[in-house]
Image (cartoon, grey):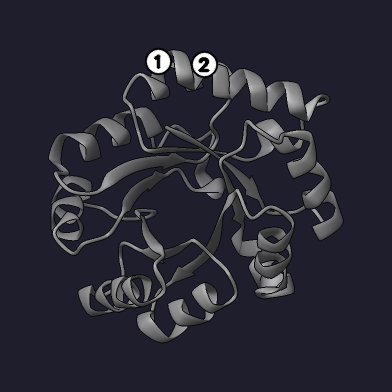
Amino acid sequence: MKLQAALDTLTLDECLDLLRETHGAVDVAEVGTPFVIEEGMAPVKAIKAAFPQIEVLADAKIMDAGEFEADKCFEAGADIVTVLGVSYDETIEGVVRSARKHGGQVMVDMIAVQDLAGRAKEIDAMGVDYICVHTAFDIQGTGQKDPLEDLKIVNSVIRNAKSAVAGGVKLDTIDAIAAENPGIIVVGGAICNAKDRAAMAEEMKERMNRA
């Protein structure tokens, strides 16, 4: 089980500092979508160069031109690239082709997917590596989505890919989530905004290891 740090709103220097502080606890460094929009692939290159032992995820949330766009991410040094589950099958399949060319991995972000079980089954057959349930930032706190219940749904139907979970994961929710044994747990603000980021990351990783 891997701990992924979602780096969305920090500067590149702040991200590098955070990854130094949390060294040994964070397995995957996510260059978040806002970061990609602002800086492109530059943070992917910089983080991979500084921390070759950490997997770097480019949260491109690809929706079209799957193989072409994924190629750009992998060529920049990304180990994992995201594509949206609501995309056409052909788009997801293109990202998978790109990943196979570059020795990378594919995470499908299930944000806004309505038939979670049905779509997860379809995507699981496409050769992706991770299927990620994602509680959107814009609806966190509304009660519309329960990441734990969504994770259970995906875990109940997938046979090939590993599951992942993202969106509002905190110290008081990570135990129940870790008990479902996802491949990756994504944590953003709970680590990035903590007073002691190293201690928070270490505590979360320890709880994951105990699950």
The residue depicted at 40 percent of the width and 17 percent of the height is: 176
Disc 2 target residue: 207
Disc 1 target residue: 211
- Say the numbered circle drawn on residue 138: none
**Residue nearer the viewer, 115 or 63:** 63
Q: Position of residue 199 (x, y in %)?
A: 74, 21
Q: Position of residue 141 (x, y in %)?
A: 54, 33
| Callout 2 secondary element | helix
Q: Position of residue 27 (x, y in %)?
A: 56, 40
The residue depicted at 77 percent of the width and 50 percent of the height is: 15
Quarter that holds the C terminus: top left
How many residues crowd mark 1 within 10 Å: few (<14), some (14–19), many (20+)? some
Q: Quadrant of residue 97?
A: bottom left
Vertical relation: 30 (above or below) 58: above
Vertical relation: 13 (above or below) 144: below
Residue at far top of view: 210
**Residue nearer the viewer, 98 or 107:** 98
Look at label 1 and name its amino acid. Answer: Ala
Q: Are marks 1 and 2 in contact (CB under 8 Å)?
A: yes
Q: Position of residue 191 (x, y in %)?
A: 69, 33
- Viewer can see residue 146: no
Look at label 2 and name its amino acid. Answer: Arg
